[in-house]
């Protein structure tokens, strides 16, 4: 099978956010090369197709290649994470079958506020929250209790998340909201901070679904804040990175594990994720609070989804083969 492995390039200068945020997006090409390597092992013929500033060049290359299927690893368009959904829409317009979530699912899950609106509407547990839109002022929410955590509305990969994101009083809260507004030029999501275990649930399939072994992110007591900060996720030489460790499988009581799996699958279906996704939780007092639903998670060999697949006895090429086979069922 001829497979276009598509990934997004990073602009030389960020359009917003911190300059260091580029590190997260630069991993897209490495991820694409890993997927292409696995496809070669499986006997397929992969072609790396980079999405840069000019979308017409990208579309023309896909038209020239006429791939049997596209592996969609694009997490943004030229530094704009909100346009991730439009890349999937382009595949639809070109009539190319592709892996992963459809545009609406990508758009909803990219928007943390809308995701939480839907989760709350359907009685799925998520931390109490409010959204402070760009240009708006924070209005105190009576039933939210400090500490709170402040996140950019649209970003993923822990962009905009640092120790200062967790706030203990209104002065720090207002300062952090202002930081998100100024630096990321988007709304600030304010959540009640859940002090508990951080659990990730990776799911593969569209029915039947396979919830892979659950993984836990453990935080060393020396960390200033027990969170997956940008440094803790991406900067390998930092103390945050060294003191933030994934453990798979997570050691959980049977009841907690069953509940986490059930809630993860319900969220996956609600947000119409497809082929594969990851649901992130904080587990406190037996309640699995959903932090985020990632409809287009990193599937690099050393990323969380591949780690869980390995524990489930799926090698990396087998994982890629499984995703390819699921997506191929949609071919006309």
Image (spheres, rainbow, N blue to C red):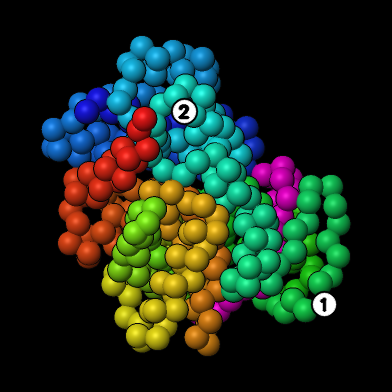
Q: Residue at x 68, y 61 (%)?
A: 117
Q: Is residue 71 above or below residue 120?
A: above
According to the picture, the residue beneath numbered tag 1 turns out to be 142
Q: Position of residue 62 (x, y in %)?
A: 39, 18
According to the picture, the residue beneath numbered tag 2 turns out to be 91
In this rendering, position of residue 31 left or right of residue 84: left
Residue 230 vs residue 105, the one in the foreground: 105
Q: Residue at x 42, y 54 (%)?
A: 277
Q: Is residue 100 above or below residue 315?
A: above
Residue 191 visible in the shown view: no
- Quick one: SS at disc 2? helix
In this rendering, position of residue 239 left or right of residue 89: left
Q: Residues within 10 Å of mark 2 (few under 14, many from 20)?
A: some
Residue extending furthest front? 332
Quarter of image, res 170: bottom right
Which numbered tag is attached to residue 49? none
Residue range of the region highlighted in magenta in the rendering: 179-196
Q: Assess whether residue 183 is covered by the magenta stretch.
A: yes
Q: Assess whether residue 142 is covered by the magenta stretch.
A: no
State the quadrant of the N terminus: top left
What whole-number distance in Å separates the C-alpha atoms at marks 2 and 1?
Answer: 45 Å
Q: Residue at x 55, y 59 (%)?
A: 270
């Amino acid at each position: 099978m001829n497979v276009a492995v598509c990934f997004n390039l990073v602009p030389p200068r960020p359009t917003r956010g911190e300059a260091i945020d580029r590190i997260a997006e630069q991993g897209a090409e490495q991820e694409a090369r890993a997927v292409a390597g696995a496809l070669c092992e499986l006997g397929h013929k992969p072609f790396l197709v980079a999405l840069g500033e000019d979308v017409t060049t990208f579309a023309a290359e896909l038209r020239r290649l006429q791939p049997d299927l596209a592996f969609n690893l694009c997490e943004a368009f030229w530094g704009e994470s909100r346009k991730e959904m439009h890349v999937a829409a382009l595949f639809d317009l070109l009539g190319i079958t592709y892996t992963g979530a459809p545009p609406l699912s990508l758009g909803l899950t990219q928007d943390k506020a809308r995701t939480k609106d839907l989760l709350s509407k359907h009685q799925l547990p998520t931390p109490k929250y409010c959204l402070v839109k760009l240009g708006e002022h924070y209005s105190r929410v009576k039933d939210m209790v400090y500490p709170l955590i402040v996140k950019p509305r649209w970003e993923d990969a822990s962009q905009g998340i640092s120790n200062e994101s967790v706030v203990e009083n209104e002065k720090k809260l207002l300062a952090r909201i202002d930081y998100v507004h100024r630096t990321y030029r988007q709304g600030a999501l304010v959540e009640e901070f859940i002090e508990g275990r951080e659990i990730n649930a990776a799911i593969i399939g569209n029915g039947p679904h396979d919830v892979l072994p659950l993984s836990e992110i453990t935080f060393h007591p020396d960390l200033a804040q027990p969170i997956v900060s940008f440094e803790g996720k991406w900067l390998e030489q930092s103390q945050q990175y060294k003191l933030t460790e994934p453990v798979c499988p997570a050691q959980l009581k049977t009841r907690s594990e069953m509940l986490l799996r059930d809630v993860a699958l319900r969220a996956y279906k609600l947000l119409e994720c497809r082929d594969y996704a990851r649901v992130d939780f904080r587990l406190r007092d037996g309640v699995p609070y959903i932090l985020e639903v990632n409809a287009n998670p990193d599937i690099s060999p050393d990323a969380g989804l591949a780690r869980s697949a390995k524990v489930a006895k799926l090698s990396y090429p087998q994982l890629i083969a499984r995703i390819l086979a699921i997506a191929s069922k949609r071919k006309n």
